[in-house]
């Protein structure tokens, strides 16, 4: 093995490891607070069915656990809702129900999703029957779904007999609505396709249904900036994150109709309440009426007119009434906006518009546009929208004696907006784009130019310096993405140096504005913003969105390595070393180039017609990342990333294949050492093979076993039988080596003779050589290298069917058979191939007339895998099977 090859694949594996580390650990710490139980929970599943006299009066909420989730996860939502109800007047409360899905692994096995959907439908009907005794019983249930539970909730509407009025609100937490994490079986993709088509084709009929989707930030590969939450959660903690649970419970209580004491079905109210609690918190509660008429004559000493450009006021310890008046007439031409902030986070109106400055009897409440940030509330008013207002009135009253600070100023937003170009991805962080801000204002906007793709990742450093050290409100740095709700907030003290991660979750659609960095700054301070490309984060972003490409190219590399073995046997009647064969499996010019050509041809209408006539499935493009992406009939995104990224995935896949095969060789050697004392020493290349009758009997047994239990189990058993063949070859190779080393040198030379001539004559002499000879050792080594390569190839289908096998094992106590079984169509031919190749060796292959044809098949199958498998990983096994069937035929013919 060449040192350059090892170094290349070591470097590639290092890049992959850096990307995986960034993907799995490159995020902020989990700052969520734990939700604790004040009472021991009582799950009344059976009791609710058996007790006919159970009388419920609350509003029904049904929690749906996700992949491998427990129904007990509902205790966080139920506990907080209970405490909230005890503190409220009016007797409003919830009845929180939960569904037990047996902790099924539905994220990777789609066979149970439809059953879960039907079970959910029956559960909703059973819940509503518990309220029949009420005069105005609830007509719908609010669903709160975590992970795949949110997808199942949306799938309810695909059922033919489902009444859409039974569900009017769905709240999903970290649910993969767009596509499954890994498409390992067709049932999963069919389920997603049915849900997508239902919601797209019948959008008008589902207008009464409101869906709120909440993600967990970079810890869960989605972003959120929920007011009063402002924390990033991982996939599991989003269920018990106290900050998010509180926001959810507040929203649910605001959705209660006081008259019916049930959830409102008004779509406009639902949208307003959810926007209030999850998108933009306007501080003042919805539908809350407040007195907005303020008279100057009532408190003449409490009014102060501000004639300066900026106001900075701190309330005293003694309670007082205080108002500040800002005249608009003299500011309209010079300024475009009015900015005000206060760290008084009370839920009350605080900014008004006066029509008559002498009395302010007629005022307009302008506080509804207030935005709640972690340290303070902020209001930005556009003067162009205040044509009927003569003065602005800011309340700084603290009748309760609470101290807070109010800062306001007039702004000319054009002069306070700067732009900085985002460095190119290939700059690798070596160059930086800097911009300095001499802060004479409270808000500065920096546009990040050319930052609009998800594979971009920036490291943004904001350094603040102030000449005068005094108490100041903290800075808030906000990355604002206009085309999608994925803003991120960072709070920093003054002075400080703060690093911000600039990463996107959706690429910019056409004709959209760019990304902005909003700096809520301290006055009279200097800020320097430095923007660099972060290579580790770029690699993490690529893996986050296109990780399934790596196993596809791993399969391609191993399949082309097998092709190299067959070509070597065809040419020299000897197999190549496995590491060399896998090292040469990186052939992007033979794989990616045809795929590029196919993509270009598919842009022509005539080629599309030919493609349709051949009934070929749509090509799998790299996953689209735009929020408004389109889908063709198969549910696969049409738009995708630039194809130049494909070679990088190929290199990573080849690195995984190279080092994975090296690990396989090491494992085989270690296990063979352990099993060697249990076997008699062998010197024959036929060790581990099976007689034809035994082979046929085992094949039939495994086929029947797969039919009555699980196809994945029979495939795994066939894989182990082939692995035993590899272990026996390894033990034989070691035994022969030791015997020849102990034999006298002259004896070995006499046995081996003087071997010269071409490869054909060497093979002929070896065939007639004694069992204890160098030629016999070489034959065993050739067979070992061939079967090691086959074993590495066989590992891929086993890994892809592992979720089905795990699901079957977990549910074995309920049923001995996996139904439906996505592996059954594949298991029968794959078992036959595995069993036939157990008896394969280089001599049989070299004498087969089908070998020339067989050696040509792996390349087109590799191209087909890259074309049709990135979004359908289960297809990899079928393409491998198509390449292995001719190889198995070589054993027979």
Image: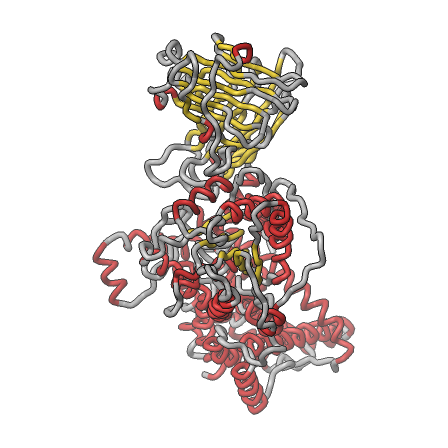
Residue at the (64%, 11%) spot, across then down: 468
Residue 488 placed where, x, y %?
A: 53, 36
Looking at the picture, tell me which residue is in the foreground, 576 or 436: 436
Looking at the picture, tell me which residue is in the foreground, 36 or 315: 315
Q: Quadrant of residue 495?
A: top right
Q: Residue furthest left?
A: 606
Residue at the (63%, 79%) spot, across then down: 685
The quarter of the picture where the N terminus appears is bottom right
Looking at the picture, tell me which residue is in the foreground, 613 or 368: 368
Residue at the (59%, 67%) spot, across then down: 54
- Horizontally, residue 690 falls left or right of residue 386, namely right
Residue 42 placed where, x, y %?
A: 67, 63
Question: Compared with residue 724, is residue 329 higher up or lower down, i.e. above or below?
Answer: above
Residue at the (64%, 81%) spot, across then down: 688
Looking at the picture, tell me which residue is in the foreground, 29 or 34: 34
Q: Quadrant of residue 33?
A: top right
Q: Quadrant of residue 634?
A: bottom left
Residue 839 placed where, x, y %?
A: 56, 81
């Amino acid at each position: 093995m060449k040192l350059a090859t090892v170094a290349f694949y070591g470097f590639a594996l290092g890049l992959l490891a850096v990307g995986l580390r960034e993907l799995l650990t490159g995020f902020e710490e989990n700052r969520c607070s734990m939700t604790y139980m004040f009472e021991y929970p009582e799950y009344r599943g059976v009791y609710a069915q058996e007790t006919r006299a159970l009388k419920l009066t609350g509003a029904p909420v049904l929690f749906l656990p996700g992949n491998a989730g427990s129904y007990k996860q509902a205790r966080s939502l139920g506990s907080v809702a209970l405490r909230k109800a005890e503190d409220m007047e009016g007797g409003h409360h919830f009845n929180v129900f939960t569904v037990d899905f047996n902790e099924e692994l539905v994220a990777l096995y789609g066979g149970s999703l439809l059953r879960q959907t039907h079970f959910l439908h029956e559960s909703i009907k059973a819940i509503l029957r518990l309220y029949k005794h009420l005069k105005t019983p609830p007509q719908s249930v609010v669903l709160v779904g975590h992970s795949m539970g949110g997808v199942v909730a949306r799938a309810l509407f695909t059922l033919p007999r489902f009444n859409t009025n039974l569900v009017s609100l769905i709240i999903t937490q970290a649910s993969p609505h767009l596509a499954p994490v890994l498409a390992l079986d067709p049932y999963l993709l069919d389920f997603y396709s049915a849900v997508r088509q239902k919601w797209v084709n019948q959008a008008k009929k589902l207008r009464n249904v409101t869906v709120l989707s909440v993600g967990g930030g970079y810890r869960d590969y989605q972003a959120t900036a929920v007011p009063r939450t402002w924390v990033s959660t991982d996939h599991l903690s989003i269920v018990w994150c106290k900050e998010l649970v509180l926001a959810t419970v507040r929203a649910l209580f605001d959705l209660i109709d006081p008259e019916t004491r049930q959830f409102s079905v008004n779509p406009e109210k639902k949208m307003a309440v959810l926007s209030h609690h999850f998108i933009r918190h306007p501080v003042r509660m919805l539908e809350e009426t407040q007195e907005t008429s303020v008279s100057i004559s009532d408190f003449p000493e409490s009014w102060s007119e501000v004639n300066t450009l900026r106001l900075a006021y701190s309330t005293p310890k003694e309670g007082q009434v205080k108002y500040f008046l800002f005249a608009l007439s003299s500011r309209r031409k010079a300024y475009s906006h009015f900015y005000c902030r206060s760290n008084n986070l009370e839920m009350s109106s605080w900014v008004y518009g006066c029509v008559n400055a002498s009395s302010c009897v007629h005022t307009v409440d302008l506080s509804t546009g207030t935005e709640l940030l972690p340290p303070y509330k902020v209001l930005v008013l556009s003067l162009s929208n205040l044509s009927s207002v003569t003065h602005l009135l800011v309340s700084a009253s603290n009748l309760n004696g609470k101290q807070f600070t109010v800062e306001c100023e007039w702004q000319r937003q054009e002069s306070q907006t700067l732009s900085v170009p985002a460095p190119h991805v290939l700059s690798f962080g070596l160059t930086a784009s800097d911009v300095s801000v001499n802060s004479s204002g409270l808000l500065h906007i920096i546009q990040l130019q050319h930052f609009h793709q998800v594979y971009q990742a920036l490291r943004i450093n904001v350094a603040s310096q102030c000449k005068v050290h005094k108490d100041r409100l903290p800075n808030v740095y906000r990355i604002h993405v206009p085309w999608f709700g994925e803003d991120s907030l960072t709070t920093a003290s003054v002075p400080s140096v703060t690093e911000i991660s600039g990463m996107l979750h959706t690429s910019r659609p056409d004709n959209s504005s760019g990304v902005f960095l909003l700096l809520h700054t301290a006055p009279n301070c200097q800020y320097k913003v430095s923007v660099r490309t972060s290579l580790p984060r770029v690699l993490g972003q690529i893996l986050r969105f296109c990780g399934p490409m790596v196993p596809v190219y791993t399969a391609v590399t191993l399949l082309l390595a097998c092709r190299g073995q067959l070509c070597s046997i065809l040419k020299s009647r000897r197999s190549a070393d496995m590491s060399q064969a896998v090292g040469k499996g990186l052939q992007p010019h033979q794989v990616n180039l045809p795929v590029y050509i196919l993509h270009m041809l598919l842009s022509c209408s005539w080629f599309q017609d030919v493609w349709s006539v051949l009934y070929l499935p749509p090509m799998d493009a790299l996953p689209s990342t735009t929020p408004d992406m389109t889908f063709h009939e198969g549910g696969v995104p049409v738009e995708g990333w630039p194809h130049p990224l494909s070679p990088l995935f190929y290199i990573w896949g080849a690195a995984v294949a190279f080092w994975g095969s090296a690990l396989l060789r090491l494992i085989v050697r270690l296990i063979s050492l352990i099993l060697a004392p249990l076997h008699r020493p062998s010197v024959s290349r036929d060790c581990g093979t099976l007689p034809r009758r035994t082979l046929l009997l085992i094949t039939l047994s495994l086929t029947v076993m797969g039919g009555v239990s699980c196809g994945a189990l029979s495939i795994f058993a066939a894989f182990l039988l082939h692995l035993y063949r590899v272990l026996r070859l390894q033990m034989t190779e070691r035994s022969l080596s030791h015997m020849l080393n102990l034999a006298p040198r002259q004896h070995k030379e006499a046995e081996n003779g003087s071997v010269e001539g071409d490869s054909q004559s060497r093979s002929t002499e070896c065939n007639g050589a004694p069992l204890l000879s160098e030629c016999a050792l070489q034959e065993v080594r050739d067979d070992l290298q061939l079967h090691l390569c086959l074993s590495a190839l066989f590992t891929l289908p086993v890994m892809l069917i592992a979720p089905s096998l795990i699901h079957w094992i977990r549910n074995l106590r309920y049923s001995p058979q996996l139904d439906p079984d996505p592996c059954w169509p594949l298991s029968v031919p794959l078992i036959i191939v595995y069993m036939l190749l157990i008896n394969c060796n280089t001599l049989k292959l070299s004498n087969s007339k089908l070998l020339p044809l067989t050696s040509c098949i792996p390349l087109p199958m590799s191209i087909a895998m890259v074309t049709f498998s990135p979004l359908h990983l289960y297809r990899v096994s079928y393409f491998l099977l198509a390449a292995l069937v001719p190889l198995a035929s070589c054993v027979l013919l």
